């Protein structure tokens, strides 16, 4: 991977990850690709997709909708890539339409690696889902567990890991100034 | 305004008390004449679509305390989802204008923005 950098952004829902990621991309080179992993399903995912679209408009992103199999994706050129987000990608790789589940770990981790190999800078957005105390069904529990393991694997590969809290970036690993 | 965030039981209210605020100063899930708003998330969850309308009045407060509610499984229930999203986004906006933002973890305060004033 020649000069390929990876930044991992994590945090809870609505903590400012997307806006921050887009702000970072503004400082990085063209072309800029936005890989959207969220399936437009249900009212509020459509609202969310629309909101993200507005956030990105005029910032020079080419949007690529890709819900599964990042390894099969070929980008037209090297550049800046924003992948949003691992929680959707993991769910898409894990559950089929009937709710039957398989282990998505390899698909997601190898997929991110494949994307990185085609990027100058890859920014990956993930989510913290492991910190509530409810009793979930086995499928959801397995999802929380595997997403936690995927996050750890990605953090290990990333040059920089930041957590967003109320829109404020906290550095968990690395030095962003060396990259951006 | 100082924004204090953290999980349930993480010590947010006790920390506010170390800044010199007492029981009588704390409005629980209410915005009234008292200088501290506690359980902001409950206010937002009651009417998620009205969250933005709270901003100006919250900015006039000395302390705003909010539970971090976005770090779990995304709820199946739409209203609950809207509540967490609205809480998160309101906190981002409050943090932008706050003099200081404190995040509590295991009772330990970390100032993640600005500087704390001395005890009142």
Image (tube, rainbow, N blue to C red):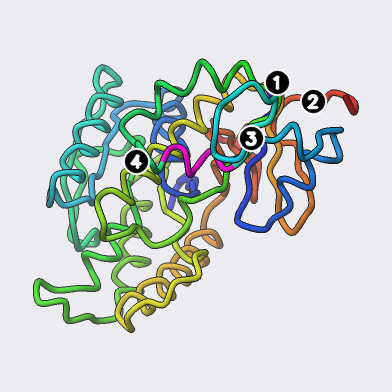
Mark toward the viewer: 3 or 4: 3
Mark toward the viewer: 1 or 3: 3
State the residue in front, A149 or B1: B1
Task: Choose the circle earlier in sequence order: 2 or 3.
Answer: 3
| Label 3 SS | strand
Mark toward the viewer: 4 or 2: 2
Mark toward the viewer: 4 or 1: 1
Query: How far apart are the two marked residues, 4 and 2, measured between alpha carbons?
Result: 33 Å
In this rendering, the count of numbered labels is: 4
Q: To which residue does mark 2 refer? A: B115
Q: Residues within 10 Å of mark 1 (few under 14, many from 20)?
A: some
Q: Is residue A143 magenta?
A: no
* A78 w.r.t. A132: above or below: above
Q: Are marks 4 and 1 in contact (CB under 8 Å)?
A: no
Task: Tell me which corner region of the image, top left, top right, bottom left or bottom right, holds residue B62.
Answer: top right
The quarter of the rendered structure image containing the C terminus of chain A is top right
Q: To which residue does mark 4 refer? A: A82
Q: Are marks 4 and 2 in contact (CB under 8 Å)?
A: no
Q: Are marks 2 and 1 in contact (CB under 8 Å)?
A: yes
Q: Is residue A39 left or right of residue A125?
A: left
Q: To which residue does mark 3 refer? A: B27
| Label 2 SS | loop
Query: How far apart are the two marked residues, 1 and 3, measured between alpha carbons?
Result: 20 Å
């Amino acid at each position: 991977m020649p000069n390929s950098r990876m930044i991992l952004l994590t945090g809870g829902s609505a903590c400012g990850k997307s806006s921050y990621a887009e702000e970072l991309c503004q400082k990085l080179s063209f072309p800029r690709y936005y890989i959207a992993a969220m399936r437009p399903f249900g009212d509020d995912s459509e609202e969310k997709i629309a909101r993200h679209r507005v956030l990105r408009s005029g910032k020079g992103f080419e949007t690529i909708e890709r819900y599964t199999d990042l390894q099969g994706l070929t980008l037209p050129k090297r550049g800046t890539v924003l992948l949003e987000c691992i929680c959707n990608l993991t769910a898409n790789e894990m559950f089929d339409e009937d709710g039957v589940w398989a282990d998505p770990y390899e698909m997601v981790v190898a997929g991110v690696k494949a994307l990185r190999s085609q990027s100058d800078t890859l920014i990956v957005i993930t989510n913290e889902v492991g910190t509530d105390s409810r009793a979930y069904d086995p499928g959801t529990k397995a999802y929380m567990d595997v997403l936690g393991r995927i996050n750890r694997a990605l953090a290990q590969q990333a040059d920089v890991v930041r957590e967003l809290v109320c829109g404020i970036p906290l550095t968990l690993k690395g030095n962003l100034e060396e990259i951006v | 305004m100082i924004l204090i965030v953290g999980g349930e039981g993480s010590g947010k209210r006790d920390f506010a008390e170390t800044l010199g605020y007492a029981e009588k100063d704390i409005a629980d899930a209410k915005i009234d004449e008292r200088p501290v708003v506690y359980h902001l998330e409950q206010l937002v969850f009651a009417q998620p679509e009205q969250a933005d309308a709270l901003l100006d009045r919250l900015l006039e407060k000395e302390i705003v305390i909010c539970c971090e509610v976005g770090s779990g499984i995304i709820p199946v229930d739409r209203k609950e989802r809207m509540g967490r999203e609205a809480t998160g986004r309101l906190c981002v906006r409050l943090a932008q204008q706050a003099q200081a933002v404190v995040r509590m973890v295991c009772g330990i305060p970390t100032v993640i923005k600005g500087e704390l004033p001395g005890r009142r």
